[in-house]
Image (cartoon, rainbow, N blue to C red):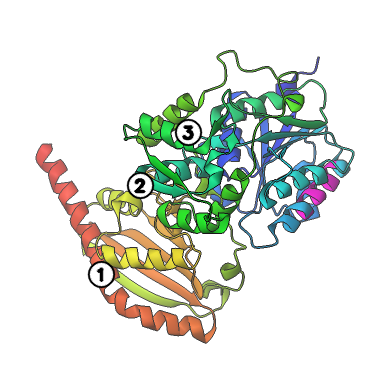
Amino acid sequence: MEKQNEIRKILVTGASGYVGGRLVRDLLNNNEHVRILVRDKNKVLGQVWAAHVEIVEGNATNAADLDRALEGIHTAFYLMHSINVGTNYDAIESAMAKGFSEAAERAAISQIVYLGGIANDENRSRHLTSRMNTGIQLASGSTPVLEMRAGIIIGSGSASFEMLRHLTHRLPIMTTPKWVSNRTQPIAIRDILYYLCAAAKLETPVDGVRDIGGPEVVTYAIMMQKFAAKSGLRKRIIIQVPVLTPKLSSLWIGLVTPVPTSLARPLVESLISEVVVDPNKSIDALIPKPKEGLLSVDEAIDLALTRTASNNVQTRWSDAAHPTMPWQKAQSDPAWAGELTLKDHREILTDVPAEFLWKEIEGIGGSNGWYGSGWMWYLRGLIDRLFGGVGLRRGRRDPQFLRIGDSVDFWRVEILEKEKTLRLYAEMILPGKAWLEFKLEDSNGKTLITQEALFAPRGLGGQIYWYLVSVFHLVIFPTMLRNIVKAARNSYLTSHTLS
């Protein structure tokens, strides 16, 4: 029999995403040999597993990059999607899957494993149809494709869970569309990973579609009530009305939850159909259930809440950035690429040690806030959400520690050197590209803390925007820097007093 852990090489695409990041961790825990394909390797360098995998940097739409990634691979996990890249995401997904199938055939790999969505209802959404067509394109070549189809994923940091959590927490009384009464079969992220890891160990290649779901069939309304009970909240009053379309529902979700409208809409549209496992496509004959059984909805919610409360969220729906969003396609390059960069520079020389300053810098954003001028930050986040951006509610994965690739409200960590540099890249809607950077340097026994806001404008409109908002910068940025130093000083003095 083949010694799989010694011979097989496994490729994980989408490793910077919610499921992919956790799958890599679990495969390594199973002593598998893992390679990943990512657009930007810097996005995964902060992961604890980064030093233990082969990293191929490339684009899934480039045949040469796919050939490099698939060379010598036995099983490839296809975990990519493009629902946030624009109105033609279904065509993009189909083309990507076709290209991957052709590359897999050239590399003569043994197995593709694809995680799609349950699409047994004829009244399926465009999103679920695209997921189904992706599977069809992957299977268009000679490589066997095991397509696992799942419904709602319950887990700390998943988009579905965040949507459920915030809707239930913030709305004791809610008017809802009729789809909250549709049946769905949610599954815990732990059980998704169990099935994916088991697929990596299959003795012979498998070709076909298998549905995976938890042990319960419920409605979305029941899930909200279960969540309320688990969170110690009163029973939610749910009033169903027929006029709330998926578009209106997703706009509302975009306003009251961290999940942006662009992501909420395909999630909502998927709930219009019944997402229930087809007994004829059950995976049980191929992969038996785990010995301890699949998690119930209550158990999955409990586990997700525990992970969230203890700040033990390993991956999050916001981990995957979408650099091809329409407003980013035409953005300018920074100064080091030869384009105009406008700058707001602030610095303070202080006797507070760098480690205390760094603690405040690394904790910026999310529930910790932005060190003053809160209403201005709130207003900018609200404007961003109204125009379809991510806004401030996206928050952080962890309230204290950051890693490269983490989202911080409407920023993303681009550079992180402990006690030296933190650079955040703006993912808000802007007429250009923007960064917020902090640097710490030793200066004759003291610490020089530098804060710079950088903006590479797109055309005249971008330059006008910068000068208009500069009035607010005169308040926001000096206040932020002063308060960071003040908070660090208080922490330093407190530690000295206690010692």
Q: Which secondary structure, mark 1? A: helix
| Residue 258 image point, x, y percent | 44, 52
Q: Residue at x 58, y 25 (%)?
A: 29
For residue 222, which numbered disc appears in the image? Answer: 3
340 and 93: which is toward the camera: 93
Up/down of 352 relative to 205, above or below:
below
- Tell me whether the residue at label 2 lies in contact with that at label 1, contact meaning CB atoms closer than 8 angstroms: no
The residue type indicated by label 3 comes to: Ile
Up/down of 140 relative to 479, above or below:
above
Q: Quadrant of residue 165?
A: top left
Q: Which secondary structure, mark 2? A: helix
For residue 170, which numbered disc appears in the image? Answer: 2
* Residue to which mark 1 is pinned: 478
**Which region shows up in magenta?**
95-104
Q: Residue at x 51, y 86 (%)?
A: 460
Q: Is residue 103 magenta?
A: yes
Q: What separation in Å lies between label 3 and label 2 (alpha carbons)?
A: 17 Å
| Residue 335 image point, x, y percent | 51, 75
**Principal secondary structure, stretch drawn in magenta:** helix
Q: Which secondary structure, mark 3? A: helix
